[in-house]
Image (cartoon, rainbow, N blue to C red):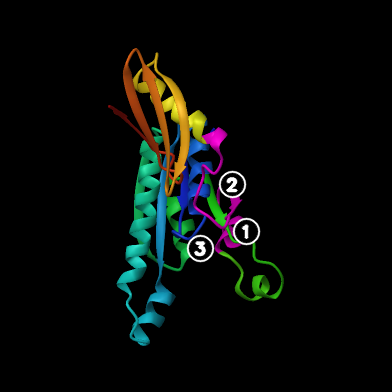
């Protein structure tokens, strides 16, 4: 049903949740994800006129795309990344047409009232004008996608099982910005680290 999924990302807080929705959809349909960041040309011009640092906009875009890359690698999803400059909604629709996107999965800040009527939103413009289906995902206030022990335990167990099918997870703990699990089998001890944003796990044998 879906062969090419376009995921525009602005690198803002909560983007990881939208990326995760995109990757889960891609896994379901064995699709390729195209992650796109558009540097807002109008904002770049304003910064240049006011003496601001325009390079920061491109850096933010690259950082956002790198996060999606790490998540795609963790979930074994084929990914293509693209960084462009222009008016965000127009550039996204243009790129969607170029790659013949099956669907666009975009985050929305859920603006309402006067702010929505005056400014609109990129997601709303995509829904109105894109030539393919658009799925919108509400951006939460955090990038953390693993926020409870049960979820962390499930992901840590899977990672440990991939490294050693007979090893068992014995403990799970949240430490600062990482989940840590310990496991063992016949005297072999393991430590598993899980990134709470990308859900990428690393298994180390002690």
Name the outermost residue toward the bottom. 50
Q: Which mark is residue 128?
A: 1
User: Who's the residue at 55% across and 63% down the image?
Assistant: 122
Considering only vertical position in the picture, is 116 above or below 8? Answer: below
- Marks 2 and 1: in contact by CB < 8 Å? no
How far apart, in angstroms, are the residues tagged by discs 3 and 1? 10 Å
Magenta segment boundaries in residue numbering: 122-151
- Marks 2 and 3: in contact by CB < 8 Å? no
Q: Label 3, on which residue?
A: 89
User: Who's the residue at 46% across and 55% down the image?
Assistant: 9
User: Who's the residue at 42% across and 49% down the image?
Assistant: 177
How far apart, in angstroms, are the residues tagged by discs 1 and 2? 10 Å
Lower sequence index among marks 3 and 2: 3
Name the outermost residue toward the left. 206
Q: Is residue 14 magenta?
A: no
Q: Quadrant of the N terminus?
A: top right
| Quarter of the image where one finds residue 125 | bottom right
Q: Nearer the viewer, residue 116 or 167?
A: 167
As helix, strand or loop, the secondary structure at mark 2 comes to loop
Q: Label 2, on which residue?
A: 133
| Quarter of the image where one finds residue 115 | bottom right
């Amino acid at each position: 049903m879906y062969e090419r999924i376009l995921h525009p990302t602005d690198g803002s807080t909560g983007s990881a949740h939208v990326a995760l929705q995109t990757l889960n959809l891609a896994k379901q349909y064995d699709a390729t994800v195209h992650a796109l960041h558009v540097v807002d040309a109008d904002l770049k011009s304003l910064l240049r006129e006011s003496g601001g640092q325009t390079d920061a906009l491109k850096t933010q875009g690259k950082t956002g795309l790198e996060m999606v890359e790490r998540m795609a690698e963790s979930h074994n999803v084929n990914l293509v990344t693209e960084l462009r400059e222009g008016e965000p909604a127009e550039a996204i629709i243009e790129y969607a047409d170029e790659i013949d996107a099956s669907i666009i999965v975009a985050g929305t800040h859920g603006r309402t009232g006067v702010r929505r009527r005056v400014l609109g939103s990129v997601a709303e413009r995509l829904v109105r004008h894109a030539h393919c289906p658009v799925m919108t995902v509400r951006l939460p206030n955090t990038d953390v996608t693993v926020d409870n022990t049960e979820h962390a335990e499930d992901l840590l167990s899977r990672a440990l099982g991939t490294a050693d099918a007979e090893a068992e997870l014995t403990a799970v703990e949240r430490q600062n910005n990482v989940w840590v699990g310990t496991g063992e089998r016949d005297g072999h001890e393991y430590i598993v680290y899980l990134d709470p944003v990308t859900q990428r796990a690393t298994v180390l044998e002690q």
